[in-house]
Image: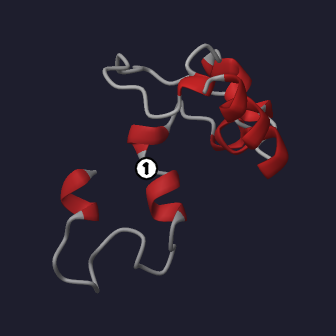
């Protein structure tokens, strides 16, 4: 799979052939992969790296599952940041 995606010759590179992105999506590597679940944000990451530094302390205690429904409006962000000052 990687060999086909990293092909230097554009006329032979997966994603650039007649089948387009379906050449990649239909590859046997992705046989058990649900593209629908990915688009619907139903998939959980296989690995979540530990948080070493906190740039946004207002969001440190938010569970990963909550990020997909997180209210990111400007007013909400300002309120959260004011609480942590």
Instruction: Identify the residue at image location x=42%, y=20%.
Output: 48
Q: How many marks?
A: 1
Instruction: Identify the residue at image location x=63%, y=43%.
Output: 35
What residue sits right under mark 1 in the picture?
27
- Where is the C terminus found, in terms of image quarters? top right
- In this view, 13 is above or below 23: below
Coordinates of residue 13 in the picture (x, y in percent)? 29, 74
Coordinates of residue 34 in the picture (x, y in percent)? 63, 36
Coordinates of residue 74 in the picture (x, y in percent)? 78, 51
Coordinates of residue 32 in the picture (x, y in percent)? 53, 30
Instruction: Identify the residue at image location x=42%, y=26%.
Output: 54
- In this view, 56 is above or below 39: above
Residue 55 picture quarter? top left
Instruction: Identify the residue at image location x=64%, y=15%.
Output: 63
> Quick one: label 1, few (<14), some, or many (20+) residues within 10 Å?
few
- In this view, 80 is above or below 39: above
Left or right: 68 as drawn, with respect to 10: right
Residue 61 picture quarter? top right
- In-front residue for pair 33/57: 57
- Check the image and tell me how it is coloured: secondary structure
Residue at the farthest front position? 85
- In-front residue for pair 18/58: 58
Residue at the farthest bottom position? 11
């Amino acid at each position: 799979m990687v060999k086909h995606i990293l092909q230097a010759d554009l006329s032979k590179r997966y994603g650039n052939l007649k089948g387009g992105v379906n050449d990649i999506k239909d590859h046997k590597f992705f046989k058990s992969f649900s593209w629908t679940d990915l688009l619907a944000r139903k998939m959980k990451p296989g690995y979540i790296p530990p948080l070493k530094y906190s740039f946004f302390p207002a969001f440190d205690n938010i569970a990963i599952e909550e990020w997909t429904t997180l209210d990111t409006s400007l007013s909400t962000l300002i309120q959260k940041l004011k609480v942590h000052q």
